Amino acid sequence: MAEQSGSRRKILWLNVMTVVSAAILIGAEVFGAAFAGSWALANLFGIGTTGQKLLDGAFVLLGAYVMYRFIISARRVEPFSTRE
């Protein structure tokens, strides 16, 4: 296909770095809370290590969804590219 003039996209590296940095920080907090929460609930209810591993998996999946939604929302505020 022929490329139209002015339709090239330029990557906004500052926005990309901002979102990636925030995602790393928030991801560490989300997944840390997931593992701490599963440990606490497993001990509170006495469900043992197997139950704790199941809670780990459930909370990590929930954390992955939270991170996915964060990235989607952050890209709306800080677009990764623009038209030249």
Image: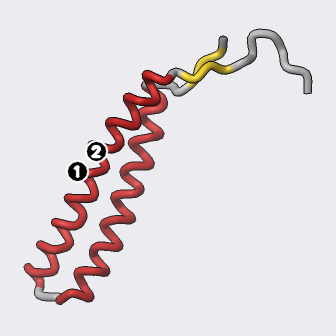
Q: At label 2, which amino acid type do we have?
A: Ile
* Separation (CA) of disc 2 from disc 1: 5 Å
Number of numbered discs visible in the structure rendering: 2
Secondary structure beneath dot 1 equals helix
> Coloring scheme of the render?
secondary structure
- Which of the numbered marks, if any, corresponds to residue 26? 2
Left or right, 67 with respect to 4, comes to left
Residue farthest to the right? 1
Q: In the image, residue 7 lies at what x, y percent?
A: 75, 16
Label 2: how many residues lie within 10 Å, few (<14), some (14-19) or many (20+)?
A: some
Whether 18 is drawn above or below 60: the answer is above
Q: At label 1, which amino acid type do we have?
A: Glu
Picture quadrant of residue 51: bottom left
- The residue tagged 1 is 29
Residue farthest to the left? 44
Label 1: how many residues lie within 10 Å, few (<14), some (14-19) or many (20+)?
A: few
Q: In the image, residue 2 lies at what x, y percent?
A: 91, 21
* Quadrant containing the C terminus in the rendered view: top right
Question: Which residue shows up at 34% across the image and 58% down it?
Answer: 63
Q: In the image, residue 12 lies at what x, y percent?
A: 52, 21
Secondary structure beneath dot 2 equals helix
Question: Which residue shows up at 27% across the image and 58% down it?
Answer: 31
Question: Which residue shows up at 22% across the image and 67% down it?
Answer: 35
Question: Which residue shows up at 41% across the image and 55% down it?
Answer: 65
* Quadrant containing the N terminus in the rendered view: top right
Whether 3 is drawn above or below 76: the answer is above
- Which of the numbered marks, if any, corresponds to residue 83? none
Q: As rendered, which of 65 and 83 lies closer to the eye?
A: 83
Q: Assess whether mark 1 and mark 2 are in contact (beta carbons under 8 angstroms).
A: yes
Left or right, 76 with respect to 36, comes to right
